[in-house]
Image (cartoon, helix red, strand yellow):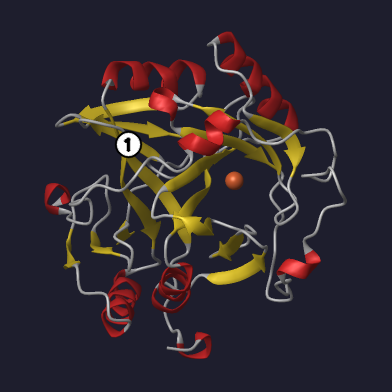
Amino acid sequence: MSQARVRAKVRALRSVDVGFAELDQARRFFTDVWNLAHIGENAGTHYFRGTGAFHHILTIRQLAQPALIRMVFDAADRPTVDALHAQVVAHGLNVIDPPARLRQPHGDYGFGCKDPEGRNIAVVCGVHDHTDAADQPDRPRKVSHININAGDNAASLACYRDALGLQVSDTTRKFHFLSCNPDHHSVVLGVSGGPTLNHIAFEMPELDSLMRGAGRMRDDGRGIEWGPGRHGPGNNVFCYFLGPEDMPLEYTAEMQQIDASHRARPPEHWKWPPGRLDHWGISAHPSERIEAAGLRIRFTDDGYRLDEWR
Ligand SMILES: [Fe+2]
């Protein structure tokens, strides 16, 4: 299916669902250190919100080892969910939990599926979101983006572009940056190392909040594994850390906002001068620890099934 024929698109990465072996420690971390708000628990799943409107941006539950359960994308309405489901089927994906009514706070309608490399995706609409969405200093607004490594980058790229309607906003030697709203990227797809989690990025309201977050991480015994710096594609500020069970996490801010006039640039455009890895030129290479951690976490087998949301 060509880009021109895509009718339906997801419009945001709402949330990421994650499992940890040590649930209490992860809960403490995301509340007290990462500065999300713990808003409830149901059947062993803990819900966290940012300051933005989305009902929740992260859930955690107990698993034998750290794993991604699913990425949850937002669709505008039921017809869009149905159209996205049709696109997913037409694209050839065949591990699908069909569209069905859902219970809040997961939405009122949606479906789950596996992408070509086995990553679990949910597409939902009608979530009862919050009406208070003002920025608060030092608190993340939302999930900015998820960066996922690929084994078969071409197959995965075709899925996110053609079946889910994301658009390539830039391409480097190592990554495809994919956009589904004014943010320069909501999904980043690596060319190798997959299908594993590279990192999950949370958006801070501004640079000062990002740096104060880095200080909280240091207070918690977690140094900066890469950064601070300012990325090329997206022009966003970054700091990378290892969260609970060495889950790679990023605080980011000042993401480039794009519109229909944006033109994706090819890898040749994104070449740093020798010795540089970001616009500021002050960050060293990512630590060996975070590079290893960014190849380790996989998706669960059954995270595409949404039975518990019905
Ligand atoms: Fe990132």
Nearest the camera: 213 or 223? 223
Q: In the displayed structure, would residue 157 be above or below residue 297?
A: below
Q: In the displayed structure, would residue 163 be above or below residue 34?
A: below
Residue 195 vs residue 207: left or right? left
- Mark 1 crowdedness (10 Å alpha carbons): few <14, some 14-19, many ≥20: many
Figure quadrant of residue 159 = bottom left
Residue depicted at x 45% and y 84% = 6
Is residue 51 visible in the rendered structure shown here? no
Q: In the displayed structure, would residue 233 be above or below residue 138?
A: below
Q: Position of residue 41 (x, y in %)?
A: 23, 28
Q: Which residue is mark 1?
A: 59
- Element type at marker 1? strand
Residue depicted at x 82% and y 44% = 276
Q: Amino acid at mark 1?
A: Thr
Nearest the camera: 127 or 84? 84
Q: Position of residue 300 (x, y in %)?
A: 24, 47
